[in-house]
Image: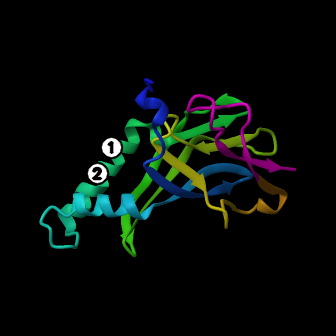
């Protein structure tokens, strides 16, 4: 029996994701993203970055790790899938990008700065983070997948859901997404 190698693919990297929607003047201006990588990928990334094999990262090695992570994620648009009222939203910039090790686990943080802030009282913002090749599994943390920060958060909430209208990996996976709802 012949089996295509792609059909046997599965995640090789797991990333626990949490986000913060930042609001100013009743509009969402930024989304802060915090990714915590699995221990196996973290270990491999550390040993690849540790060029001099001294089991610690010097400044040059940290900068190379940071640059490599940024460039690799940039190639894939940081696996960001934003929608505004069901239309794709690409009008954003990545800021404050950093990757570092905490207790031997790789963490990456960055800010999605919306060029045109979104009024969640009029429009629906939906955020998803996923790799359609299913090489990387980015999942929202169970404990606190999202937070809302800013002066108008009491009128807003978020909803984490599995988007049954979108699939990838041969129709077998539905992405998790978060939408902000304000009334």
| Magenta part of the chain | 159-183
Colour scheme employed for the rendering of this structure: rainbow
Q: Is residue 19 above or below residue 115?
A: below
Asked if residue 52 shows in the view, the reply is yes
Query: Disc 1 vs disc 2: Cβ atoms closer than 8 Å?
Result: yes
Residue at 63% in and 34% down: 172
Residue 71: numbered disc:
1
Q: Secondary structure at mark 2?
A: helix
How far from the left and from the top, in percent, is residue 105? 40, 68
* Residue with the mark numbered 2: 67
Residue at 40% in and 44% down: 73
Camera-side residue: 111 or 159? 159
Q: Secondary structure at mark 1?
A: helix
Residue 97: numbered disc:
none
Q: Is residue 121 above or below residue 167?
A: below
Residue at 38% in and 36% down: 75
Q: Is residue 165 magenta?
A: yes
Q: Is residue 103 above or below residue 40?
A: below
How far from the left and from the top, in percent, is residue 82? 61, 38
- Badge 1 density bin: few <14, some 14–19, many ≥20, Cα 10 Å: few
Residue at 12% in and 66% down: 52
How far apart marks 1 and 2 lie (CA) works out to 6 Å
Tell me: 17 left or right of 47. Answer: right
Asked if residue 99 shows in the view, the reply is no
How far from the left and from the top, in percent, is residue 13? 44, 51
Camera-side residue: 65 or 48? 48
């Amino acid at each position: 029996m012949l089996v295509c190698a792609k059909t046997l693919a599965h995640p090789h990297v797991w990333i626990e994701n949490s986000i913060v929607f930042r609001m100013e003047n009743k509009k969402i201006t930024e989304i802060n993203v915090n990714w915590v990588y699995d221990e196996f990928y973290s270990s491999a990334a550390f040993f690849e970055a540790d060029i001099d094999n001294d089991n610690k990262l010097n400044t040059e090695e940290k900068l190379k790790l940071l640059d490599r992570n940024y460039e690799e994620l940039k190639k894939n648009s940081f696996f960001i899938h934003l929608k505004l009222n069901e239309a794709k939203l690409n009008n954003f910039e990545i800021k404050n990008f950093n990757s570092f090790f905490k207790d031997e686990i790789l963490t990456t943080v960055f800010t999605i700065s919306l060029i045109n802030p979104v009024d969640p009282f009029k429009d629906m913002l939906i955020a998803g983070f996923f790799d359609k090749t299913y090489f990387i599994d980015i999942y929202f943390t169970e404990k606190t997948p999202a937070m809302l920060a800013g002066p108008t958060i009491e009128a807003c909430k978020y909803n984490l859901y599995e988007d049954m209208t979108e699939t990838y990996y041969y129709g077998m996976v539905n992405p998790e997404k978060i939408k902000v709802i304000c009334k």
